[in-house]
Amino acid sequence: MKTLDWITLGLYFVLMLAVGIAIRSRVKNARDFFTAGGKMPWWLSGISHHMSGYSAAVFVGYAALAYTEGFSLYIWWACSIALALVIGSSVFATRWVRLRLHTGMISPLEYLTARYGHGTKLCLACSGSLLKIFDVGAKWTASALLLHMFANVDLVWGVLLIGGVTLVYSVIGGLWADAATDLSQFVIQLISGISMFVVVMRHLGGVGAITGIWHSLPASHRQLFHGQYTPGFALTFLLVNLLSYNGGTWSLAQRFMASPDATSARRSALLSASLYLVWPLVLFYPMWAAPLLLPGAAHPEDSYAILAQRLLPQGLVGLVLAGLFAHSMAMTSSDANAVSAVVVRDIAPSVVPKAWLDNETKQLTAGRICTFSFLAGSMIIALLANHMGGVLGLILLWYGALVGPVAVPMLLGMLPVFKRCGAFSAISSWLSGVATFAALRLFAPSSVNGRSGSLVLSIGGPVVVSLIVYILSGLIRPNDNPRAAALLLELR
């Protein structure tokens, strides 16, 4: 990192703070803070959804997979997300808007009271909030690792710097600030990503190198599926993504809820899907080409950072680093806002005096306090990531495996075909998924940590068990809640 790179990175952080502060005037109550008042245009919602869907961990953990496994990463990751969003654009995205319009809810979990009962909602809200702390902690760690690779900044200071800036604009501006900074970050990462693509392509011989690298790389790198990343794993990851990217990840549900109508929500989902199909081809190109430029790298996870430092001129290195941070900051700020919505609207009313949250002005203050607390807690988790399977372990194992038990009753509960599944099904599904995850961690350690085991089993086991239990328990003990039936009729 040279002086011009530091200036570029510093200007990026100042821009994020400025955007967050500037948008503050649009946030007058909790509804604005959590759902942008239902006024977010589809193109902004779609870009924000895409930016909030992955983080700097892609440039650390996934950079290593691109280096060692090749093109298969694009198939099981990017294509599965795009397909999941295409499927969900008409099934789930439209229903999130209808839920807000019909019930007035501003938290993704509020409807669960009518669907399953207050106790079930509270159970899912608490477990999901705890899970997100681990997920966001992994994002901070990945970002800090990149700053350490580029500038030798200590991990502790990296987490505090990146997390601190995100904390300020998230607390001030809520979802509007998240979306506005997502748009700014989208432009920055677009410029930085294309710069890396062009520089690597020219270094390898020009336009012909776009396809030519595959003839120079090992044959296994051209395979659609390779090693442990099999078709079975891709289908498993598709199931996880179908749940996660259509609302099982609460911050992504918020993007749909913030849309003014069902048509806008569907368009935003399709825009995000399109970006997932196209942009990773540009983004991953330097990672796929890295074995040719950095043969025999001892630490493949460092490959993207090393290429940027070696090939880019002053200023652009800082811009690339800012582009990498853009995804993490977009994702973590979105998660913080979503979790604070759940805490304020779904958890806190059960544990604090009603007078503390009896109007949206008080809920706005509480939302800002919760956002601050969540981000601070996730930063602590980030400093402990090495004791929990590392960055990739946190993302693929902890979050990938546990998102299903929370998301299955949450998303399937919106579909009339599962109207027989009630509170018993939701709790049974959640408990069985968590128990399966715990059993697999004890008796079948995943190969994500370099040990024996199956990624399909580790990630797919909890999700599949939750899904099966949810469906079967609805047949064994059908739901007879009239409020749930009425709600499902409104969502048609």
Image (spheres, helix red, strand yellow):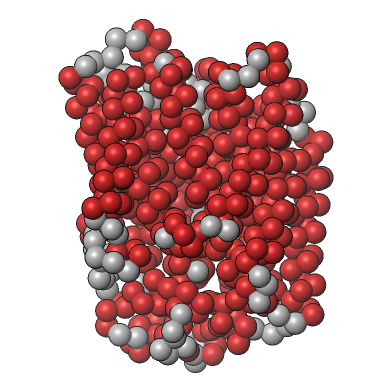
Residue 390 lies left or right of residue 334; in this view the side is: left
Judge left or right: residue 47 versus residue 467.
right
Q: Is residue 94 left or right of residue 105?
A: left
On-image quarter of the N terminus = bottom right
Q: Quadrant of residue 72?
A: bottom left
Residue 151: x and y in percent read: 67, 77
Quarter containing the C terminus: top left
Where's residue 319, x and y in %? 69, 71
User: Residue drawn 40% across and 10% down?
Assistant: 483
Please name the residue shown 46% across and 59% down the image: 387
Q: Picture coordinates of residue 337 (x, y %)? A: 62, 39
- Above-or-below relation of 139 to 49: below
- For the question of whether residue 335 can be seen, the reply is yes
Q: Is residue 455 above or below residue 198?
A: above
Q: Quadrant of residue 257?
A: top right
Q: Residue at x 40, y 77 (%)?
A: 67
